[in-house]
Every structure is written in structure tokens, then in C-alpha cells.
Amino acid sequence: MTQVGAGHARMVAVEKFCNSFILIFMSSSFILPKKIIIASRKSLLAMWQAEFIQQRLTELYPQTEISILGMTTRGDQILDTSLSKIGGKGLFIKELEQALADGRADIAVHSMKDMPMNIPEGFVLAAITEREDPRDAFVSNQYNSLEMLPADSIVGTSSLRRESQLRAQFPHLQVQPLRGNVQTRLSKLDEGQYAAIILAAAGLKRLGLADRITSLLSAEQSLPAVGQGALGIECAANRPDLVTLMQPLHHHETAQCVKAERTISRILGGSCQVPLGAFAEITDDVLRLRGFVATPDGKRTIKDELSGKPETGEQMGEQLAQQLTAQGADKILAALTLTDHWE
Ligand SMILES: NCc1[nH]cc(CCC(=O)O)c1CC(=O)O
């Protein structure tokens, strides 16, 4: 234990040293740009996330003007129609990437959960930030937990991942779709349309709504979505200068976890919304990777896990995807029709 602790302290010290080195190196004015423009969706959560990165960058580079370009994406405009049929997750980030490609913006901030599994050609993930609470939250105005809900209570979520896990453990509950941004979802709960709803804890905490969290669901109860709680900073592939500038915001352990998780859904074909969860965490230099695939009705669940060295996260992702496939995950996913379900 003490050895691991000392090793970690040393690593942190080395990281700090390297960061200050990068900063000294970059303060030579020719390399620091005069301004950095952050492209963001206009939802409150997206803007909070962009402002968070703006603040961090302002602290790091006080001489650089950091501004935000709020954009409405096709995905935001057509929330009521069946998104999965017209382009999936990528619809939320295409306009932001176009702004990066045109030079209207320098970086884009995204929830890693909303990033497609393959970053389009011409763009790179410059940094993955330290993960906020990755868990799902139970939110209710009347009940303390899922266990307390009476039979036939209506629980709101549009995520097949959440739905399948709820139905497997609480077959007596009714799961009904719940769309919109975080505020909209909370007001639908407050209007009485649902006995409870499930949301990501990270979004609620970021928006200052942590007091709306009735209880947190453990990873056993609700395995989080790939990337949940982490932010990604994207830039054009031809801007290595920006990749360098973003390095102090990069969180190595979070990136190792998120890469392991994303490998699973890349292999299993998580291009549109599917009942799949993957969650990695590092304790004492061991990465524990868990994954599941289920039928939306929760009647069939395939889950498995692996532990190994954090550096081998991506190989572990490949292996776990293979193990899930060997148990029939590919058949479950192939049997799904495109549906309008979103996290
Ligand atoms: N697609 C919605 C979305 N994208 C990211 C988050 C939460 C924040 C995060 O996971 O970083 C949410 C809201 C939710 O699922 O409740």
C-alpha cells in the first residue's frame, strides 16, 4: 500500500513538474495564440462544460483571450423525430466540427458520453478531462430509492442502457420515455408524469442541481454509459499546437478508463443507442473493466469483467468485447431495430 501511495505521489509530482515545464516552454509568446475560441452546443449543460474549460484555460494562459461560440446543432433542432434513423450521435457534433474545420473555432468541448465511437477523419481528441461522478442518479420527489417504488410506478428514461437494467432488477416497474435536456426532464418529473427519473449524476452536479439527487445508483445497479462523466476536447488534426496547449487538462487515468470503455462499444457496434454499458475504474494501479449488453426488456443480460494493468486498457476492451460476443452479445445487438432511444 505505502509503496503504491509513494509511487502515486511521485507520479503526481512528475506530472506537475512536466506541466510547469510545458507552461514555461509555451509562455514564449510566439507559441501562445492571442485567442482560443471554444465551440459548444447551446444547452445549459454544454455551456457549463464549455465555461468550465474556458476558466481552466484562462487560469493556464492568462494572456490568451478564451471565448465561447454557442451553436445549435441539427441534433438539437430535431429532438422529437427519430434521431437514430437520420445520423445518430454524430448529429450533435457535426456543426461543431465544421466550425473547427473552417477555423471559426479552435476547440470543441463535448461530453465523452455523446462522442461517436470513431472520431471522423481530420479531427482528434486533444484531451480527456478528469471524470466527474460517473454514476447514474435516482431522482424522485416522493420516494427514496428504486427499492421503495410501488408496483407499476412510472420511471422515466430514454436510455436503453438504463431501461434494460431497471427492467431486469425491478420487473414490476413501468419504464417510460423521457426526452429533453436535464431541466426539461426535471420539470416533467415535477409535473407528476413520473414517480422517479434516472439521470447522470455528473450533469446534475455540474448544473448546481446536486440537491435534486435522491440517491446514487451503484455500478452494480446501473452500469454507467461509456465515457459518462468525462469531457473531451476536440480540435482539427492539423492543429498539434492546440493539442499541446490542452495537455494540462488531460487526465491520464480517466483517459485510460474511457479508452477501455470506448473500445468495447466500438467493437460491439455502439454507433447508435443500444442497451450497452461499460465502466472502467482504477484502484491501486489495477484497472477493473465491466461491461454488459442486454435485451431492452431486461430478460436477457450478458455481463462480464476483467482486471489488468491500466496501460493495457484498450486490449482489455477488445478482450471483454470478445468475451461478451462469445456469450451472445452480438446476437442481442443484431436483433435490435433502430429505435429512438437516447441517453
Ligand atoms: N445525452 C445527455 C447527456 N450527455 C452527458 C450527460 C451527463 C454528463 C456526463 O455524462 O458527462 C447527459 C445527461 C444525462 O444523461 O443525464
Image (cartoon, rainbow, N blue to C red):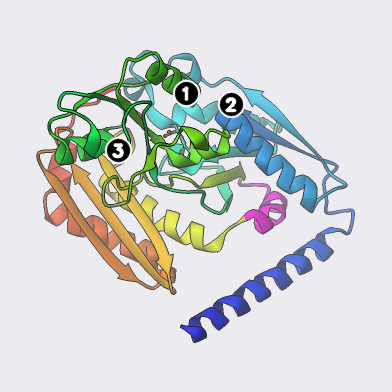
**Foreground residue, 214 or 187?**
214
Taking the magenta stretch, the answer to whether it contains residue 247 is: yes
Q: Residues within 10 Å of mark 3 (few under 14, many from 20)?
A: some
Mark 2 and mark 1 in contact? Answer it, CB < 8 Å.
yes
Name the element at disc 1.
loop
Is residue 101 in view from this perspective?
Answer: no
Asked whether, in this view, residue 269 is left or right of residue 27, the answer is left
Disc 3 marks which residue? Answer: 145
Disc 2 marks which residue? Answer: 44
Q: Residues within 10 Å of mark 2 (few under 14, many from 20)?
A: some
Residue drawn where x is 55% and y is 45% of the image: 232
Disc 1 marks which residue? Answer: 181
Image coordinates of residue 100 in percent, x first then y, are 64, 35
Q: Which residues are magenta?
A: 237-249
Label 3 – label 1 distance at C-alpha = 23 Å
Taking the magenta stretch, the answer to whether it contains residue 59 is: no
Screen quadrant of the C terminus: top left
**Foreground residue, 264 or 174?**
174
Asked whether, in this view, residue 64 is left or right of residue 219, the answer is right
N-terminal-most mark, 3 or 1: 3
Residue type at mark 2 is Leu
N-terminal-most mark, 2 or 1: 2
Image coordinates of residue 52 in percent, x first then y, are 66, 41
Residue type at mark 3 is Ser
